[in-house]
Each structure stands twice: as C-alpha cells, then as structure tokens.
Image: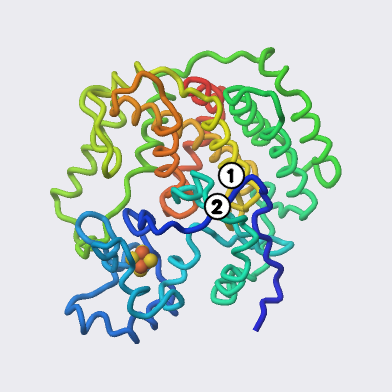
Amino acid sequence: MASAVPLKVLDLREQRYSCHGCGDCCRDFSVQLRDEDLDRLREQRWEERLGAPVTVEFRGRRYLRQQPDGACLFLQPDGLCRIHAEFGFDEKPVACRLFPFNLAPDASGVRAGLNFACSSVRANRGEALSTHRRDLDRALREVPEAATIAPPRLDRDLRAEPSEEHSIAEGLDAWLKRPGVPLSIRLDGFAWLAQSLGAASFAKVRGPRIRELVDLLVSALPGELEHLPVEPPGGGQRRMLRQAVFARIEDPRFTGDERKPSIRARLSQWNRSRRFSRGRGAVPSLARGWRLPEDFESIEAMPKVDATGETADLVIRWLRASILGGRAWGTGYYGWPIADGVQALALDVACLGWLARAHAAGEGTAAVDLASVAEALGRIDRARGRAVWLGSAGERLRLRYFAADDGLRRLVRANW
Ligand code: SF4
C-alpha cells in the first residue's frame, strides 16, 4: 500500500550518494530497534543460534548489541552484515536499511535528509539522491509514525505554518550558498543568523513578516559582521565548547553490561569528561582509529581550519543538507523549535572546527585540511538528532549560554 504522505527527497543537486560497502555505519553506531525489528530478529532465531542475547535495553529503548570494539554484533570480519548475507537486505533492521537517510515528517510531507557520518555522502560519491526514492518509499511504509503531521514550532507554544518554515529555511540556504563569500565569513554569518533568530519574538512576527525579517537579516550580510566585531571566546566559553564536543563523540557501548556499568567504566567516563572540561594536559581518546594529539595545548596551538576549496564545498553541502533535509529542527532534531535547532547547528559548526583541529594535531599536520574536517564531520554528524542526551534540557541550557554574549559567533570564528 502506497503511503498517502508525500516523500520529499532532499533536493540538492550537488549531492550524490551510493553505498560503497565500507561497513563504517556498522561500527560505533547505536542501532535502535522497532517492534517490527525485534519480531524479525526473533523469527531469524539468532539468540538460539548464537546462544546469547542480540539486543540490549538502554534508557527504556532496545538496541542491537555490539562487539567489545563497538562494531555491531552482526558485522562480519569481511565487513558485511550477517543478517543481510543470510536473509537479505529487506530483513535488516529499518534503521540499517534507511541509513544514511533519515525521515522527518512536517506539515507538508516527510523529508528524507542525509547523515554525513557516511563516508560516501561526505565524499559525494554515487548516484543522484532521487534514484533512492523507491527504497525510501518502502522504508516510509514501515515507519508509520513518520506519516504523522507534525509542524515544527517557532517558539515554545507556536506551531509554524509550512510557508513560515519555508521562509526561514530558504533564507538560511540563500546565505549559505551565496557565491563569492569565503567559508569563514559564511559560517560567521550563519552563527549571527542563528543568534538573531533566537532573539526574534515570533509571537509578534508571523506569516509574511517572517519572510521580511529573514530577508532583512540575510541582506544585511556580510556587511553587518564588520560592524559587529566579536572578541575571542572567554575561558568559560572554550570550556563549554570542549564539553559540547565530548557530548558529541562519547557514545555508550552496547556490549551487554550497560544496565550495571562497572564502577571502573563510570569512573573512566567521568575522568574523560573532566579532562575535556579542564582542557589541560593529556587528551583522552577522541575516536576509534584516531591518533591522539600530545595534549590539549597542542590543539589550541593549531591554526584555524583551512576553509577553502573542497573543505568549503563539504561543509556547505552538510549545512544545506541538514536544513533542507529536515535534520535541523522539528521531528528531525528532537522536536526542537526552529531557532533552537539553528543554534544547535551553529554550535555543531564550532564543535566541528575544534574537532578537526584536534584531528590535525594528532596527525601532526601543519594545516587543518580537508581530511581532518571530513573525519571530524563523520563524528559530529553521527550523533546529531540521534543521541538522546543531545536533545536534553541541559543541552538547551548550554545553547542559551552560548547564544548570549555572542558565544556562537565567537566560537565559530575561533575555529574557522
Ligand atoms: S544489523 Fe547489519 S547493517 Fe545493521 S548495523 Fe548490524 S551489521 Fe550493520
């Protein structure tokens, strides 16, 4: 039965994707399961065959169990999925079949966006996105709640009309793709737009006036940035940024003992978090396979990201895809109001810059180049919209802190 809800595949002609079978999405990824997935796993009789549970409960949700190194239990040494190999593509969990796409319903349909944790998406390799429509339509039929009409909010209690949401998305997109503007200025302008939207009183500005407001803000760029210079971030802002990075790269392991994590595991996590906060001395592990920088000081000593050429193309594709593909606010981002979601994306830009500099410091390179930005983006975008703690009240408070006192702009400028 065809879904009555229109599916809008991300309309970004610059972006391509096909799976190249790297298996990266089966490593360090928590795969949340639906009831239908659990039924299928039961029918496949894995627990009898393997003699051990294949799922794990964590904070009231069910996930696929992982191997000790963070790889999915079903990931074989040849890099292929065992469920896929034995039962076929259609028998895998829905999340696995959808990745790197996500489905985000709003008032006018369901948007299919893209996750840049996928290396083929980052490298822009493969077919046009429209060629995946059939698979996405099929996945949509298996995710009935995606068909629930859910307009995003402008504010805590105000639902946005489709035209209002469209005005904001179009305005942001127009700025991001404006030709001839260096990436560092585009990102600074994006952080300024995020802060300005956060300060807007949407109870008084509705309908066509939202379009006027956004057009006014966007037309003021980039000139406005010169009139509003910002200081480098203060110590508190830098500390909070490192904490934000930690929250984005620290994933729980679903190896089976998370209901009673050992004291040692808890202490180790607490210790890593403290070291990130302090920002001095040895750096705890950043990501699987990454070389560690000597210390936090060597990260701070790295230059800003070399934001030209392919690096600029990658970062702008990611931001545009997040906004146009429904991953920046509303159902694609923890149900957050539009302005809060845009601010979270601006914070991710700052986190991405910091993490790319950390990667380059670990590699011992003099410049923060495309390879480091691509690696860092693979980590930052992995968690966004999925990790429950990034949608928490504490995270919203962190954003309020950053948005005050030009914190988002200051942190973006310090890293880009
Ligand atoms: S079930 Fe298969 S596709 Fe899904 S994460 Fe595990 S190995 Fe990858």
Q: Residue placed at 19% from the left, 57% from the top?
A: 68
Query: As displayed, is residue 77 above or below residue 48?
Result: above
Residue 262: x percent and y percent? 15, 54
The extreme right residue here reads: 208
Task: Say which quarter of the image contains residue 346.
Answer: top right
The three-letter code of the residue at mark 2 reads Tyr
Q: Quadrant of ligand 1?
A: bottom left
Whether residue 163 sits left or right of residue 360 in the image: it is right
Foreground residue among 337 and 411? 411
Which element carries disc 2, helix, strand or loop?
loop
The colour mode here is rainbow
Real-space Cα distance between discs 1 and 2?
7 Å
The residue singled out by tag 2 in the image is 333
The three-letter code of the residue at mark 1 reads Gly
Query: As displayed, is residue 144 above or below residue 229?
Result: below
Q: Is residue 192 visible?
A: yes
Residue 229: x percent and y percent? 61, 13
Callout 1–callout 2 Cβ contact below 8 Å: yes
Query: Looking at the image, how many numbered discs can be counted on the residues?
Result: 2
